Image (cartoon, rainbow, N blue to C red):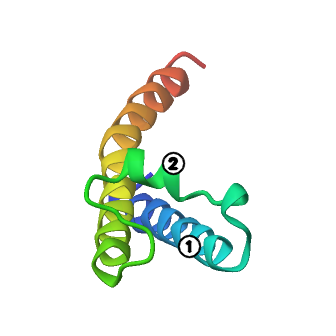
Amino acid sequence: MKITSVGHAVSLFLVITFLICIVWGLVTPPSLHMHPAWQDLLPGFEFGTLTGILIGLVESYLYGWYVAILFVPLFNFFNRNSSAQK
């Protein structure tokens, strides 16, 4: 696995998921909103403000890279070890 491919893929997945949740919050009643969870996970995010949404997008993208930077080396390490044992 390559960190760049996984980084972009996971980051875009999280950004798209974030945007879907924002749209969901705009079209559903407050009792069904997801933004309280985003406010806990994304420091500085505020639902309904352009600045808050931009902060959420940037942080979602960065979280994707965080996952890739940790996951890919671990996956490659364990995959290499399992291949050597066969």
Task: Please tell me which residue is depicted at 64% across the width and 60% down the height of the picture.
Answer: 33
Task: Please tell me which residue is depicted at 72% across the width and 58% down the height of the picture.
Answer: 32
The image position of residue 51, as x and y in percent, is 27, 79
The image position of residue 20, as x and y in percent, is 62, 73
Please give the residue where the numbered disc 2 appears in the rendered image. Answer: 37
Task: Please tell me which residue is depicted at 43% across the width and 64% down the height of the picture.
Answer: 11
Please give the residue where the numbered disc 1 appears in the rendered image. Answer: 22
- The image quarter containing residue 61 is bottom left
Q: CA distance from mark 2 to mark 1?
A: 12 Å
SS for dot 2 = helix
> Pointers 2 and 1 in contact (CB under 8 A)?
no
32 and 3: which one is in front? 32
57 and 74: which one is in front? 57
SS for dot 1 = helix
The image position of residue 49, as x and y in percent, is 36, 79
Instruction: Give the amino acid type for the residue marked by disc 1 in the picture.
Output: Ile
Position of 86 compared to 68: left or right? right
Residue 30 visible to the viewer: yes
- Which comes sooner in the sequence, label 2 or label 1? 1
Mark 2 is surrounded, within 10 Å at the Cα level, by few (under 14), some (14 to 19) or many (20 or more) other residues, namely: few
Tell me the quarter of the image containing the C terminus: top right
Position of 72 compared to 33: left or right? left
Instruction: Give the amino acid type for the residue marked by disc 2 in the picture.
Output: Ala
The image position of residue 42, as x and y in percent, is 34, 53
